[in-house]
Amino acid sequence: MARHHPGGFVERSRIVEGGGDVAEDSRRYVSWSSTPSVASAASTHSRARMAEVARRLGVEVEVSTLEAWDPAGRKFDAVVAAQAWHWIDPIAGAAKAARVLRPGGRLAAFWHVFQLPPDLAEAFAEVYERLVPEAPVNVRWLSGPPEAAYAPMLTKAADGFRTAGGFCDSEEWRFDWERTYTRNTWLDQLPTIGLLTRLPQDRLAEILEGVGAAVDKLGGSFTMRYSTVAVTATRNGAGPS
């Protein structure tokens, strides 16, 4: 008997991941699929590093952008993008997905959106704005409703699905969950957030020091609210081939 997974995947699903930047998600795809996933790295700077991580997980890796990737006539049950669709051309990426999906196959782009506790969000904002005053982003949104920050991405993705053709009407999915962080586990993760990935090490160290002090004031740990938000559609019998 086939074992079912979220989104209608079954144990023998063939899955292609566009933009393999999240190792934990790649690991789940491998556990769902008897045929190793194909990961196409989304951005030049991350390709070699993320390809190596994915290969260690047992994922078949073909380094390319999704838009330029050559599927060599293969068909898949799902095309997924975790934390990566915003790096992909929304129309060209959807057109490539339509080309490689079997009828009834699913395209899903999703993001994990977090909401910081207000005290921690305020401390992060104060330190960030002091150290990076030229930043164009208002980081105080980190304490707001999780779905608000990603609504434009979901809309842009859905518009791309529709424009590319070959898909039924898109849907938006949301799954709410929580995770508790200690001071150290949060500071380990913080440098991977897009706002901080390109900061000089001295500025990053000061931000980590300020945020760490804020976590200490909360008792050394805190619970983070997450929402996994997705836009998804199934392949119909028309459109790109």
Image (tube, rainbow, N blue to C red):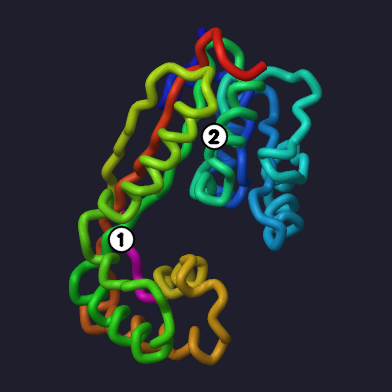
The picture places residue 133, in percent across and down from the top left corner, at 39, 87
Classify residue 27 as left or right of residue 139.
Answer: right
The picture places residue 191, in percent across and down from the top left corner, at 50, 72
Q: Residues within 10 Å of mark 2 (few under 14, many from 20)?
A: many
Q: Which residues are magenta?
A: 179-183
Residue type, mark 1 in image: Thr
Question: What's the distance in space between the residues labelled 1 and 2, CA to CA?
Answer: 27 Å
Q: Main secondary structure of the magenta part?
A: strand
- Between 59 and 129, which is closer to the camera in this rendering? 129
Q: Secondary structure at mark 1?
A: strand
Q: Secondary structure at mark 2?
A: strand
Residue 136 belongs to magenta span: no
Residue at point 34% right, 85% down?
A: 129
Residue at point 59% right, 41% down?
A: 26
State the count of labels.
Answer: 2
Residue 10 visible (yes or no): no
Residue type, mark 2 in image: Val
Residue corresponding to mark 2? 80
Residue 144 visible (yes or no): yes
On screen, 146 above or below 10? Answer: below
On screen, 142 above or below 91? Answer: below
Image quadrant where residue 44 sits: bottom right
Q: Looking at the rendered structure, which numbered label has been put on residue 217?
A: none
- Between 198 and 215, which is closer to the camera in this rendering? 198
Q: Looking at the rendered structure, which numbered label has been put on residue 180?
A: 1
- Between 178 and 17, which is closer to the camera in this rendering? 17
